[in-house]
Amino acid sequence: MEDLVKGLVNVALDHIRGGDADTHDADDRSRSTWAEVVSANPDTDHDSQLSHGTRIKEQDDDTNNDGWETADKYKHHKVNKHKWDQYKRPIDEQDYSCGVETGIDTEPSEDELTDLSKGLGKLWELDLNRLSPGKDYQIDCGEGKKVYQRGDMAQGSLFSWLSEEVLVRPTYSRFCSLLDNYNPHEGYKENVTHEERQEQKAFIEEISRTAPILYLHKYLSAKGVAPEDYQDFKNMLMGLWFDLYGRGGTSHSSSAFEHVFVGEIKQREEQEVTGFHNWIQFYLEEAKGRVDYQGYIFPRRHCQSPDSETQLLTIQFEWNGVLKSVSSTLIGVSPEFEIAIYTLCFFLGGEDNYIELGPYPVNLKCYRFGNRLGSAFPIADDS
């Protein structure tokens, strides 16, 4: 194990040296609803705004006078992408959040340093940016099914609404700006532009000011895995999450970020969705009609089925018409939290990491791809 850790540290340091990863109280919150669709108006400026809607299982013929087709009486909101252009500028020319509030303890305790599961549990507590179900968003799990069952068990979409303020939060907004930088088909070489690289660096800079990432740095540096210098540590995160590697027989065709958060479509034999474990990506792709939610997967033992309050889901869906028969995701957690837990598992955990995240017994799976992070995702520990 010691040799493995040393090897991973060397990889990280090599990167650093190399330079350049129904009706609710509408008065007290804004919502988007999946009862609406993206405008069919060809004059819509898709480069300046991203529309949040849903695939439609039943659609009315009504068209309101502002160009939005609707399937019901509500109108969804749009997320303005104008500020995303700022993220393409050099990182020292951008504005960032002020950082963690005074009084937040991001120093790992001796118990946490001794027990990785306690450290991972602490990250859940430090996720100050996590959403609250019923307050920030609403989901409808629909009906359940076995993994091998086919057919749509959900009458509607997974997400019913999302508060308009969520995706303008600094780390959420910067995370969203990264999602359209990738070709979803596995084996196609990625061409990362200079502007996209700036977006990556700006994302790392933004999350580096949050409690989970500050804690992650102190934990890893205390273990001798990460450099004490914070800029070097940020470079290490860039390398781990955004450096390209080969997958599907083609070099420079994938990265940890793309696989884990964005998802890929495997081209060999029968097409298959791999990765795609992030709820924000699911929300946005469902909005654009590219994701068809088909129900949750029954727990392996007779325990409580998920409901609108559940934040760890095992589901089945199609993405761009390609099936993912089983997928698990943490709903409402922040981007910085997921980066932190999977990075910690990669450097100090194993393939299986049995822990508790708040009320959820979880096995955090972490797969290495040589010296790279190949995949990481949660599995509900209901066995």
Image (tube, helix red, strand yellow):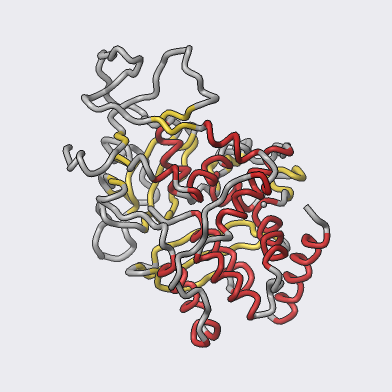
- Residue 80, position in %: x, y? 46, 31
Relative height, residue 23 to residue 1 (above, below)? above
- 70 left or right of 284 in image: left
Residue at 73 percent across and 50 percent down: it is: 245
Which quarter of the figure is the N terminus placed in? bottom right
Quadrant of res 162: top left
- Residue 84, position in %: x, y? 56, 36
- 338 left or right of 30 in image: right
State how many labels appear: 0
Residue at 63 percent across and 53 percent down: it is: 256
Quadrant of res 300: bottom left
- Residue 246, position in %: x, y? 73, 48
Relative height, residue 245 to residue 284 (above, below)? below
Q: Nearer the viewer, residue 65 or 314?
A: 65
Which quarter of the figure is the C terminus placed in? bottom left
Q: Nearer the viewer, residue 72 or 110?
A: 110
Task: Using the rendered image of the protein, determine whether residue 260 is visible from the camera's viewpoint.
Answer: yes
Residue at 22 percent across and 44 percent down: it is: 28
Residue at 64 percent across and 40 percent down: it is: 186
Q: Nearer the viewer, residue 294 or 50?
A: 50
- 215 left or right of 160 in image: right
Relative height, residue 128 to residue 188 (above, below)? below
- Residue 132, position in %: x, y? 31, 55
Task: Using the rendered image of the protein, determine whether residue 268 is visible from the camera's viewpoint.
Answer: no
